[in-house]
Image (cartoon, coloured by chain):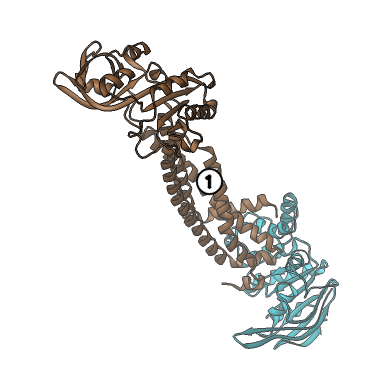
Amino acid sequence: MRLIEIFEESISVLKTNGMRTALSALGIIIGIGSVITLMTLGQASQQSVKNRIQSLGSNLLIVRPGAQRSGFLRGSASGNTTLKYSDAKAIEASQRINTIQKVAAEYSSRTQLVYGRNNTNIQVSGVTGEYFDSRNITLTVGSPITEQQNQNMEKVVVLGPTVVEDLFGTNVNPIGKSIRINGTSFTVVGVTKSKGSSGVGNSDDIAYVPLQTAQKVLFGVDYISTIYVTAKNDDLMEAAQNQLGFLLLELHNKATPSDADFTVSSQADILETATEVTSTFTTLLTGIAAISLIVGGIGIMNIMLVTVTERTMEIGLRMSLGAKSRTIITQFLTEAVVLTITGGMLGVLIGVGASTIITKAMSLPTAISYQSIVLSVVVSCLIGIIFGWYPAYKASKLQPIEALRYE
Amino acid sequence: MIEVKKLSKTYSNGGVETQALVDVSFKVEKGEFVAIIGPSGSGKSTLMHILGALDKPTSGEYILNGKNVENMKKDELAEIRNKEIGFVFQSYNLLPRMSSLKNVMLPMAYGGIPKKERIKKAEKMLKVVGLEDKLRSVPNQLSGGQKQRVAIARALTMEPAIILADEPTGNLPTNQSNEIISLFEELNKNGHTVIIITHNDDIAKKARRVLTLVDGRIVSDQKNI
């Protein structure tokens, strides 16, 4: 008997028991549907975190003071005073480093901003001329802090949109207005465009002043908190990271990387930390959905065992007409696989539908992974084979005469 | 054609042994029409099942067309059931969801015959048994006699040399029963070897040879003239 005929017959049998077929396939439908939905949602939220972080600049390297450790998260970076403005200048001037484009230095601390009766306590960053470019910060009005202003220690400030709102209220052009930072008067020269909160600090609630102004006028420090370096392109990130590291080791008179009093990290490192959480969560949820798939499989096995018992007479008859054990196994296995694949495909439809609706509703990027669809169909086929095998084997082992006598 | 030597079958049920067949030996030649009669529990059906390769004897030999059947593997037995023997059951044993045509086609599907040929052959066989107008009917739409004729068509379709019938008229009223018997007579005239189990003396009289079984033993082997 050819496989195609066995297949046709399976369909006709499954149709005869329509209600039962539908109910037993339901487990697989729900299982596959939820696996696809959860996988898609997980990937969508991961993608969304990634997009936000990359909008901060994907070829950006960040040098911070403090011991070299794995990852980005460290204990107390603020207590470290090892990074100097001269380091940033040395990096920029170095002939040996050929993989980088821009170098920007930053010193930031929290302080009080006052305009009239309004005041706000926010982060104030002293920055060099390349800062805005290298961090992809754009302005809605005015102009950014220039290197000239840094050199001259001018008292100018660029404000984040939230600060503007807090100090001036809405619909007010703050350009040219004078505010007091830490008691000193500054002129507002620009307002940054809103970036939204990225999970690594709110870049809207911040004020930028020239670096040297911040160091000498506002805070009286001789160190900086961060050096931002942009690599020439994304592929040179690692090379740039190494070159930077060795140059700084030399500048700081350290012999080996383990003595380093600074960290060089990339966006990739931050990304890793940020996506680790979501991916763990996704894996967990998908795992639970996968368990429901196994339960669905057991349901299939159960119904196939009932079918085999019900059709004992038929099996006996088929054997008495010349069906071999192999043919009987194939017949029942095909029935189980047709059942699970049909369920699997319906599950894919439901999963794709549900994840499209949910991602739209949560305005996440909809990225249905085709691998997960192919995987689901393969998995449902496997479930059919695994859970259908025992009932089919049981059927094939019946003795023809005993099966015929069965009532 | 068929030869059995010292065939015995013992069932053990919960430690109690029942002897269904005891040292049964006989021969059936090609073209014979044999009736096996005997009271209930005499071992007729057990004998028929062994002859039909549906069951194995406890001891003894069964030679079918020169081949020893009693030691064959499962798949070889399936082959024998498919090609060498046509079996007709008392309760017809048709698959209820399939039409007469499909029921008749079933053994050919297992015999590896191409589908087109199967349909042609099945139509021909249903014509032989006089059911050419019931090709698409499912068993529920047929009378007992018609069902049994479908079953006979099914038994004939692989052109086996031997037709075994286990009380084929047991569930039928007299008029339908007579039709079935004349069908067997005709098959025998056309050269088929027919072995039939029956309770019915009238049928036994139509056979050319009658084996009588009592308590698992052959007590008489008569030729009807």
User: Is residue A359 found left or right of A12 in the rendered image?
Assistant: left
Instruction: Give the letter of the chain under mark 1.
Output: A
Question: Relative to the observer, which residue lies in front, A193 or B191?
Answer: A193
Image hue for chain B: cyan
Residue A405 sits in quarter: bottom right
Residue A115 sits in quarter: top left
Question: Relative to the observer, which residue lies in front, A238 or A88?
Answer: A88
Residue B145 in view here: no
Residue that mark 1 sits on:
A376
Residue A1 in view here: yes
Question: Relative to the observer, which residue lies in front, A333 or B37?
Answer: A333
User: Measured from the top left, where is residue A257 in percent x and y?
Assistant: 50, 35
Question: Relative to the observer, which residue lies in front, A54 or B50?
Answer: A54
Q: Is residue A68 above or below residue A172?
A: below
Label 1 crowding class (10 Å Cα cut-off): few <14, some 14-19, many 20+?
Answer: many
Residue B107 sits in quarter: bottom right
Q: Is residue A7 above or below residue B34?
A: above
User: Measured from the top left, where is residue B127 in percent x and y?
Assistant: 72, 58
User: Measured from the top left, where is residue A125 in percent x and y?
Assistant: 31, 23
Element carrying mark 1: helix
Q: Residue sitting at 62 percent across and 51 percent down?
A: A7
Image hue for chain A: brown
As shown in the figure, which amino acid type bears the numbered disc 1? Ser
Which quadrant is home to the N terminus of chain B? bottom right
User: Going by the picture, which residue comes out furthest to the left?
Assistant: A117
